[in-house]
Image (tube, rainbow, N blue to C red):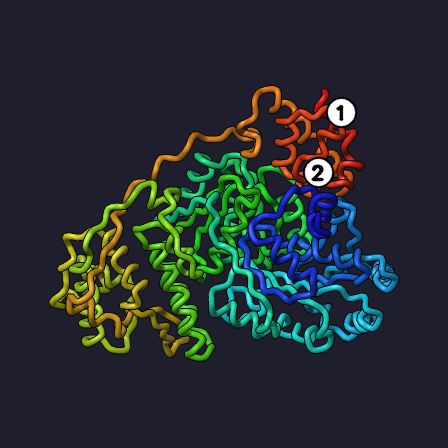
Amino acid sequence: MSPAHSVLHAVFGYAQFRGPQEAIIEHVAAGGDALVLMPTGGGKSLCYQVPAIVRQRAGQGVAIVVSPLIALMHDQVGALHEAGVEAAFLNSTLDWQQTLDVERRLARGDITLLYAAPERVVTERFLGLLDDLHARGQLSLFAIDEAHCVSQWGHDFRPEYRQLTVLHQRYAGVPRIALTATADGLTRADIATGLQLQDARQFVSSFDRPNIRYRIEEKKQPLEQLLRFIEREHAGDAGVVYCQSRKRVEELAQGLQDAGVNALPYHAGLPADMRQQHQDRFLREDGVVMVATIAFGMGIDKPDVRFVAHVDMPKNIEGYYQETGRAGRDGLPADAWMVYGLQDVVNQRRMIEGGDAAEEFKAVLRGKLDALLALAEATDCRRVRLLRYFGEESKPCGNCDNCLNPPAVWDGTDAARKLLSTIYRIQQQDAGLTFGLGHLMDVVRGQETDKVRQFGHQQLSTFGLGAPYSEAQLRAVARQLLALGAIGVQRVTTEAGHAFDTLTLTAASRPVLRGEQAVLLREATAQARGKKTRRAGALPVAAADLGPDAQVRFINLKAWRAEVARAHNLPAYVIFHDATLAAIAQQHPQSIAELEGINGMGTKKLEAYGADVLRVVGL
C-alpha cells in the first residue's frame, strides 16, 4: 500500500480514491505543483490533506492552507482533529494568547496543516513565521483553496488573492496546489497567471453533477412558487435560497417562516453575531433553510443540502454552478431550482452597462450573462448546455426539466419584429425621452393608457399590432430579445437626478427586424406536478432504502451522533456522514473488526467511537 493509500485508509477511513484524486495526490506528494478543477462534492480537500500528511510523515514539515472563510477553517480543522490529525487555524476568532500558542506549536513542528486567510498569509508577521520554517526545511506545501478568487474574470474576485504570488517568489521550492470548483477557460488561464502556476500540471475533472436535477421556471410570484416547491418536494429538508438583495432576503425569510418553514436570513447587513448564529444553526440543525445573498455559501461543507433555489438570476454560469453545487454534496439526489423573469434580465444588463469598468471587461461580462440567459431559455437539455460552457461535451441527461418534460416551442419572430419596430418608432418620435417595457407593451397591445395618449403613441403605425398575443407571450419575446442582445438597456438620468431604464435597439436588432433571424420560444406551461410531500422529520435520503430494523438502528445512531456533536461543538456530519451511519445500520456490525471496513471509519474514529457505535446498534 502506497503512503497515500495508507493515509486514506487509516486516517479517513476510505478504501479507495475517487476519480482523479489519486493522480493529483501522488503528484503533489512527490513535490509537483497542481491546478485542480473539481466539482463541489468531488473531494477537493483530500487532494491537499493527504499529501500534507504524507509529506509531514516524511519529515517535510507543515502545510499551509489558504482559505477565505472562517467557517470553513473551523469545520475542516474540527474534522481533522476527529480523524487524529494535528491541525490549527490562525484567524480573528483567536485572542492574542491563543494566536501565540498556535505560532509556538507551528515553530515546534507540532502542526500538520495550518489554515489561514489570504489577508493574514501576506502579512510580514506571517511571512516571518514561514521564513523560519523554510530555513529549516519544514514547509511541506501550500494549498490555495477557492482559487477562482484570484481571477478578475471570476464570479468572486478578491484582490488579496493576487498577492499570493509572494509564496512562489519567496519559497520557490515548496510545491503549491490551487483548487476551485468553478472556472471557464478564461478564468482558468487567469488563475494560472495570477498565482504563477503556468507550469503547474492541470487536473480538470468532469463538471457533471449527475445527482443534481436542474430546473428553471418563469418567475411569476416567487414566494408562492418557492413555497410550493419546498412544501411539495422538500418539506423538512435543508436548503439554500439565493436572492440578489438584502431586502429580498428578509422578505422571503419572513414569508417562509410565516408558512411554517424553518427559515433563517443571512446577508452582510446583519450583525456579525447573528450571521454566525444563523450559520451555526444551518450547519448543526436538521432541516434549516437559509435565505441568503451570495455572502453565504463559499466553503460550506454541509453534505445533506437537498436543494438550492434561486429566486433572482445570478450574474453568470460560474456563479450559478458554484451555488447550485452546494446541493447534494453527499452524492444523493438534490434539486437546483430557479425562477427568472424579464426584470432579472433588465437588472443584470443595467448593472453591466452602468458600471465603471472598461469596455473590454463589460464585453466579457455580457458574454457570461448571455451564456446564462441561453441556459435559462433553452428548450434542450440543461446539463448539456451547462457542461458545454465549461468545454465538456455530454449527452442529454434525462433528469433535467427539459428532458423530463420537453417544452413546446412557438415561433415568436413576428411578435419580436413588432416589438422592435415599436421601439424604433418611439425613438424616432420622442428621442431623448425614456420609455420602459411596460409602456412598450401597452403600445404594442393597443392599450390607450394616459401615458400613451400623453405622447400620442396611439398614432404610431405599430399601435395594437401585437393585440393577438398575450402579455405573457410578449414578455417572453422581450426576454428572449434581451437574451439575444437585440434589445439594449440604457440608464438615463434626468435633470432632476432621477434615473430610468429605457429600451434601445442594438446592432443585433437588424437581422431580427429583417426576418433573417428566427425567435423561437418555449411555450408557457403549467408547473409540473411535484413529488409526494416528504413528511417533516422523515429519514434522510441516505437512509431511505433501509429496512425497518436498519431504520431503527439509523435513528438511534443519528441521536447518538447529535449528542457527540454537541459535546464537541461541531456539526454532526463532521463526526460521521449520514452515508456512514446508513452503512453501519445496514451492515449491523457485531465487532470492532466488522466496523473497520466501513467507509468513513478511520483508525482514530474507530478508537474513539467504535465501542459506542456497537453499543448503539445493539440496542
> Can you give x and y, in whole percent of width and height, for residue 394 in the image?
39, 52
Is the residue 191 above or below the residue 374 in the image? below
Is the residue 557 above or below the residue 369 in the image? above
> Can you give x and y, in whole percent of width and height, for residue 386 in the image?
41, 55
Q: Which residue is mark 2?
A: 601
Give the SS element for disc 2. Answer: loop
* In front: label 2 or label 1: 2
| Label placed on residue 497 | none
Q: Nearer the viewer, residue 56 or 552?
A: 56
Identify the residue shown where x is 69% and y is 62%: 30
Q: Nearer the viewer, residue 581 or 597?
A: 597
Q: Which residue is mark 1?
A: 615
The amino acid type, in three-letter code, at marker 2 is Met
The amino acid type, in three-letter code, at marker 1 is Arg
- Upstream in the sequence, badge 2 or badge 1? 2
Identify the residue shown where x is 74% and y is 61%: 63
> Can you give x and y, in whole percent of width and height, for residue 438 in the image?
28, 60
Left or right of 213 on screen, residue 237: right
- Residue 130, visible in the rendered structure: yes
